[in-house]
Amino acid sequence: MYYASTPEMAAAATGAGAFGFIAAGFTSSRALVQDIQATRKILKVPAKDPTPIGVGLLGWILDKTEISEDPRLPAVLAERPIAVWFAFGLNLGKYVTQVREYDASREHKTFIFVIVNNVDEAIQAADGWKVDALVVQGIEAGGHGRGDAPPLLTLLPSVLAEIPLRPAVIAAGGISTGKQVAGLLTMGADGVVLGSRLLCTPECMYPEPSKEVILKSNYSCTIRSDLFDEVNQTAMWPAGINGRAIANDIIQDAKVGLNLEERLKKYRDSKVDGKLNRLVIWAGDAVGFVNNRESTKVGIGLYFEIFSN
């Protein structure tokens, strides 16, 4: 998740036996290269070896950056991350093709993940683009996704049933406990995504006030809406994509009928005053289980401990 992941978090996840990602967002190619190299340094990876992390890239942002003077994808691929992750674009297939073409002239082959929010997207990614992994993201997921995505427990078996000869399938959305992970693996997932579960780790870049709110949250504290992007002035996502975040007075302001200008003023005033009631805190349903500040390494290690017993 952009504005959450850091090189330290990605390195800690990989070092703990999982697979860490950094999120590109609008980050410049130079800064992305620095982040990838930082994870390499933390993990003490020899220069001859690929970087054992992935880089998450948003299709709608790539549509802007890849025709600019600072294209991101070539710079990222040159650093040889083991994987890239594409999400939310009108034609992600062209970026899958771009990666395959870049890799055609070298030994290193980049593993490609693509987020899907429905069966049609999954079929396109698996059969049309021949990706290496489908990230099957349910409506419970934090941050952005399709507003009409089914719940994960509906979407996952649907994808598994419709694509018998499929790439790896990774379950995403509202996952926090070992029992959830076990259930999803039993259903046929090849792996799971942990996102919101790690938002209060020291390695997450979320500011302290946001972490404070998360630690006090309950099991029904999030909501999916366009309202967060409106006041955050990030309403640039493709049609049908909205965000799940901690429900607060941003939602209430709209419910009482305030127009956008009035809501923006309240949002800005709350920020200036340091209040917690209008923070945009992207988070999924999994935050209901977040009750400590344990490190990424410790948190991920607990899952391996559960499954080794």
Image (spheres, rainbow, N blue to C red):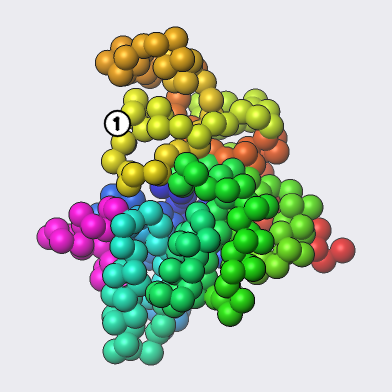
> Which SS does the magenta portion mostly show?
helix
Q: Residue at x 55, y 59 (%)?
A: 136
Across and down, in percent, residue 260 comes to 30, 18
Q: Residue at x 80, y 63 (%)?
A: 307
Across and down, in percent, residue 303 comes to 74, 57
> Looking at the figure, which quarter contains the C terminus?
bottom right
Across and down, in percent, residue 223 comes to 54, 31
Count of picture labels: 1
Return the residue found at the far left: 69
Sort mark 1 into few (<14), some (14-19) or many (20+) by Cα contacts within 10 Å. Answer: few
Asked where in the image residue 24 lies, by quadrant, the reply is bottom left
Q: Is residue 70 magenta?
A: yes
Which one is in front, 139 or 11?
A: 139
Task: Identify the amino acid type marked 1.
Answer: Gln
Which one is in front, 248 or 107?
A: 248
Asked where in the image residue 302 lies, by quadrant, the reply is bottom right
Highlighted magenta segment, given as a residue range: 60-77
**134 to 291, vertically: above or below:** below
Q: Is residue 306 magenta?
A: no
Q: Residue at x 29, y 41 (%)?
A: 236
Which one is in front, 95 or 103?
A: 95
Under circle 1, the secondary element is loop
Q: Residue at x 31, y 76 (%)?
A: 97
Left or right of 118, for residue 218: right
**103 to 258, vertically: above or below:** below
Q: Is residue 297 visible?
A: no
Q: Is residue 285 visible?
A: yes
Left or right of 263, for residue 153: right
**233 to 38, vertically: above or below:** above
Across and down, in percent, residue 84 comes to 42, 67
Which residue is disc 1 drawn over? 233
